[in-house]
């Protein structure tokens, strides 16, 4: 009856002429812990103001307040600000409320479209005095009622003067209904308009929708598909809660994820979900998301057992690995064979290898942004595995039900039994082990605030000789606060600390025992906002500051009988900062631009002593002309400049686009290594008075195409990168415990160029990708002084120059429980310097070497095969399990890790060392509970 009276009032009163404007009488009201309908009823009793509304428009939330000398219209604006209800002042004392919609007393501008002036209506009330108000939203009630009853209808936003556009933004989170865990890579598909998006690592999404009715679908592999009817009036938020779809028979078509290949503005971006690595056969059955990354075009390793990745012809130190915003300096175990990140807690990694977003800085080649899972907020969950050399366990524990959770994980290796089983006396007494632990706490404080705290530690320890023990460790901690100021403005604040250290203990039957140590530590604060100005402009802006502390090296005698003299190199300090802004601009429906700038600055600071060398002379101990002393916090040298980040995309059709980009970068920290491949005991060095920062410029151009409605993705992208002040070292350089390391350093130019091809199949029983990269990485060190010049100052291949790189990843799903997978890799052999002759001088034999990197080791070829067997998918089982059976290096190819040369009986012989020269079978048992 109440609804009928309300409608009757609207029909009778709204068409009436407007009342003569008078100054309304102010009101006073106080209320505590009342619902909005109770507040309106209280005001009606205490004054002669009348409200017309339906109580079910409001929730049960209770509010308190006190107002005096305020008009009824001002009071309603305050009271209804955070509700979907609008109001219309029919008279000075009568107010008509409406859910979501605006009530009109005159047709708004644009109601009849852009008609000529001669055809515009003249008999409409107040037509000559129309105001800018949103256009009406009309809903076909028959279409609305045609959906099944279980399809919920959700109204988003309310019309007001800020909602003059026709396209609005819906945002929110997607979570599992049972656990409350955020879901990454969930597709939100607009089935009405053909638009779509995916959730990020926090389960957050944004999608642009037209005003009116849209049918949205949330879907992903392993989740039940969910439909909602959305009536859009303005910007707003909506959180999805989805069920686990364990009985799903058909493969989910992730359409929005496929569209990102074509529609994303920034090229050179890859997203790898940790689950994708589950079915790829890898060494000793260990999931390794970094090896999956290395199978993508433009990303490679120097070889088995090599620490780090080379991205688009860059050095390994030019990549930044972030774990929940904290830097991890060495993300691998056991010389790069295993990743140092727990695969059960890792959710996804987003890789930027082209134009890096403005919020990131400090590395030239790439950023690997790694995020962890959010824990289950409803019940305890876990996952574990046991393999030939490792065991792993992860637990998710609710803290505040429905709000917060704790995730803890631990992993360890027990590989000593393999070394003891080998038919090699030297290795029988060797040891090799590692472990890592991680804990994350996630708390959704309220709708607008979310906090995630992370603590991580990893340690490797190995001894391949009887007298030496090597160990290295990573430590990382971060607190990330996501705050939503409004539907248009979201901010992220983070504070992180990272530390990488290694130690070498030498303990022999002599008086030369020692302990050598090194450590690098950094602390960073970062804050950035994402602000949507309107439908076509989205700003990203913020600042970042980082403090470096490096302990370059300590040498201590080990034991009272050691004759080793202790040494402690002076610490290094530096401060890096940046302020940035970028605009993502949809120029037209086809053309989009992302343009930004980051002002980067670095200051090397004291306390420190810096050598000054004679100008025009090579740097060595004999050319030092002065030594400058800097006090604590005093600036030694400042570097920096603007970094441009520009990307554009033109959409020819919904499934074909061309993208181009340009960026330049600064890097103020460098690795010091005089080995061909990176090792865990390489050190990091800050730029200072004598060592300049590395810089780069990169241009990219690519074509991206989806075929067969997204079943196939094809892309071809080219790049050219110029680098300046790239570091290398003189032959035979002494790196460790050198307090004048600049005398061993040479800096030169680099250039890298290439073409990357990717063919990806995303649907059907057979899926995977084929990647091919042709690229070159060349460097040049030229100087007037022979000791600082390499290969006569000409460009020559870098240690990681591999012109041809082919990767094939394939998985065939026979049934929901049985699948087979294949991993094939081919790479051109990396460059090497060979001895090409020998000579005798003063009755001593000497070896004459070729130009640096003039030859190559044999090509790298490897084939891996695997079978995955899952348990049955009954939903109410206590635990779900699966087996992974794989063979690494099926062909048994003896791929060389390195070549070295020895002299025997007056002859120089080449010897080859390999990591895995035979097929390596493994079986791993995994369980979820």
Image (tube, rainbow, N blue to C red):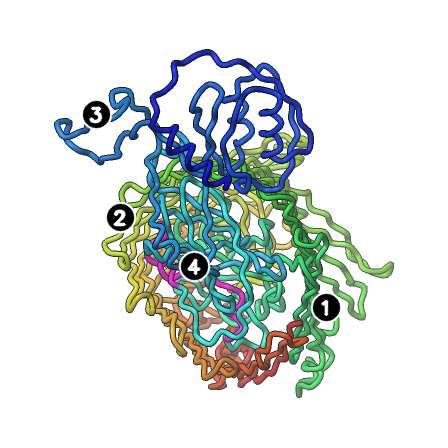
The quadrant in which the C terminus is found is bottom right
Percent x, y for residue 39?
A: 61, 30
Q: How far separated are the C-alphas under marks 2 and 3?
A: 40 Å
Q: Tag 3: Cα neighbours inside 10 Å, few (<14), some, or many (≥20)? A: few
Find residue 227 and report its image quarter. Answer: bottom left
For disc 1, the marked residue is 468
Percent x, y for residue 780?
A: 39, 53
In the rendered view, tell whether residue 804 sits above or below residue 374: below
Q: Looking at this view, name the residue that lies furthest to the top.
A: 23
**615 or 125, which is in the foreground?**
125
Tell me if label 3 and label 1 are in contact, CB under 8 Å. Answer: no
Q: How far separated are the C-alphas under marks 1 and 2?
A: 62 Å
Q: How far separated are the C-alphas under marks 1 and 4?
A: 60 Å
Label 4's element? strand
Q: How far separated are the C-alphas under marks 2 and 4?
A: 25 Å
For disc 2, the marked residue is 590
Q: How far separated are the C-alphas under marks 3 and 1?
A: 96 Å
What residue do we see at 30% from left, 66% from top? Answer: 709
Span colored in magenta:
255-279
For disc 4, the marked residue is 217
Percent x, y for residue 467?
A: 75, 70
């Amino acid at each position: 009856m109440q609804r009928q009276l309300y409608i009757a009032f609207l029909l009778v009163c709204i068409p009436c002429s407007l009342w003569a404007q008078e100054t309304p009488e102010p009101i006073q009201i106080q209320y505590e812990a009342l619902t909005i309908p109770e507040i309106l009823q209280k005001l009606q009793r205490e004054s002669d103001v009348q409200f017309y509304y339906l109580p079910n428009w409001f929730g049960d939330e209770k509010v308190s307040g006190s107002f005096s000398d305020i008009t009824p219209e001002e009071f309603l604006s305050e009271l209804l600000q955070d509700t979907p209800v609008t109001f219309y002042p029919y008279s000075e004392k009568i107010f008509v409320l409406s859910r979501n919609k605006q009530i009109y007393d005159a047709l708004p501008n644009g109601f009849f479209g852009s008609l000529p002036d001669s055809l515009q209506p003249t008999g409409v009330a107040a037509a000559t005095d129309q105001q800018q108000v949103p256009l009406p939203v009309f809903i076909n009630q028959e279409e609305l009622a045609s959906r099944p009853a279980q399809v919920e209808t959700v109204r988003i936003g309310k019309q007001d003067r800020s909602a003059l556009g026709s396209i609005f933004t819906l945002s929110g989170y997607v979570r599992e209904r049972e656990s409350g865990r955020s879901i990454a890579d969930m597709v939100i598909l607009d089935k009405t308009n053909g638009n779509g998006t995916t959730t990020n690592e926090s389960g957050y999404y944004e999608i642009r929708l037209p005003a009116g009715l849209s049918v949205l679908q949330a879907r992903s592999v392993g989740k039940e598909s969910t439909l909602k009817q959305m009536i859009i009036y303005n910007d707003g938020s909506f959180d999805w809660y989805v069920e686990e779809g364990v009985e799903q028979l058909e493969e989910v078509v992730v359409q929005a994820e496929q569209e990102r290949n074509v529609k994303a503005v920034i090229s050179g971006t890859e997203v790898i979900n940790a689950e994708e690595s589950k079915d790829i056969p890898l060494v000793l059955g260990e999931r390794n998301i970094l090896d999956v990354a290395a199978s993508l075009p433009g990303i490679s390793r120097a070889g088995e057992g090599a620490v780090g990745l080379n991205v688009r012809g860059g050095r390994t130190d030019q990549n930044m690995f972030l774990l929940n915003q904290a830097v991890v300096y060495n993300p691998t175990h056991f010389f790069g064979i295993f990743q140092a990140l727990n695969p059960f807690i890792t959710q996804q990694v987003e890789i930027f290898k082209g134009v890096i977003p403005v919020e990131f800085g400090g590395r030239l080649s790439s950023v690997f942004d790694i995020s962890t899972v959010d824990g289950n907020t409803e019940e305890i969950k876990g996952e574990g595995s046991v393999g030939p050399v490792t065991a792993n366990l992860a637990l998710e524990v609710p803290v505040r039900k429905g709000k917060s959770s704790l995730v803890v994980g631990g992993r360890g290796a027990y590989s000593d039994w393999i070394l003891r089983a080998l038919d090699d006396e030297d290795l029988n007494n060797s040891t090799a082990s590692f472990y890592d632990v991680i804990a994350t706490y996630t708390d959704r404080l309220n709708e607008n605030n979310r906090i995630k705290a992370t603590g991580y530690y990893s340690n490797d320890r190995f001894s391949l000789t009887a007298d030496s023990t090597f160990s290295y460790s990573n430590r990382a901690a971060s607190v990330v606060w996501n705050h939503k100021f409004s539907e248009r403005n979201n901010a992220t604040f983070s504070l992180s600390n990272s530390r990488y250290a290694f130690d070498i203990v030498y303990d022999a039957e002599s008086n030369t025992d020692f302990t050598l140590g090194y450590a690098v530590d950094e602390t960073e604060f970062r804050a950035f906002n994402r602000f949507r100005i309107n439908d076509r402009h989205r700003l990203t802006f913020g600042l970042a500051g980082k403090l470096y502390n490096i302990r370059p090296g300590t040498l201590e005698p080990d034991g009272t009988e050691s004759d080793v003299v202790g040494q402690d190199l002076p610490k290094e300090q530096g401060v890096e900062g940046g302020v940035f802004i970028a605009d993502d601009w949809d120029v037209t429906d086809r053309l989009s631009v992302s343009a930004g700038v980051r002002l980067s600055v670095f200051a090397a600071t004291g306390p420190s002593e810096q050598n000054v060398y004679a100008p025009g002379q090579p740097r060595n101990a004999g050319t030092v002309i002065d030594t400058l002393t800097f006090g604590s916090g005093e600036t030694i040298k400042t570097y920096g400049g603007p970094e441009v980040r520009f990307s554009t995309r033109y959409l020819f059709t919904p499934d074909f686009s061309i993208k181009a980009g340009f960026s330049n970068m600064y890097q103020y920290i460098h690795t010091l290594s005089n080995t061909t491949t990176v090792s865990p005991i390489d050190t990091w060095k800050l730029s200072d008075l004598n060592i300049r920062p590395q810089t780069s410029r990169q241009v990219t151009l690519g074509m991206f195409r989806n075929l067969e409605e997204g079943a196939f993705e094809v892309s071809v992208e080219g790049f050219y990168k110029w680098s300046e002040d790239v570091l290398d070292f003189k032959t035979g350089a002494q790196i460790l415990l050198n307090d004048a390391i600049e005398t061993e350093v040479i800096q030169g130019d680099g250039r890298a160029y290439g073409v990357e091809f990717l063919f990806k199949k995303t649907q059907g029983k057979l899926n995977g990708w084929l990647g091919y990269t042709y690229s070159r990485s060349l460097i040049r060190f030229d100087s007037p002084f022979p000791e600082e010049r390499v290969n006569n100052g000409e460009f020559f291949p870098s240690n990681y120059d591999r012109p041809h790189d082919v990767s094939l990843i394939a998985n065939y799903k026979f049934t929901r429980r049985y699948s087979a997978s294949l991993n094939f890799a081919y790479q051109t052999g990396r460059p090497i310097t060979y001895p090409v002759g020998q000579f005798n001088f003063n009755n001593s034999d000497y070896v004459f070497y070729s130009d640096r990197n003039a030859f190559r080791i044999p090509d790298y070829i490897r084939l891996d095969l695997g079978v995955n067997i899952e348990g049955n998918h009954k939903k109410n089982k206590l635990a779900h399990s699966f087996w992974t059976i794989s063979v690494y290096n099926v062909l048994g190819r003896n791929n060389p890790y390195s070549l070295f040369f020895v002299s025997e009986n007056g002859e120089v012989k080449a010897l080859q060392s390999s990591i895995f020269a035979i097929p390596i079978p493994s079986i791993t048992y995994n369980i979820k509970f």
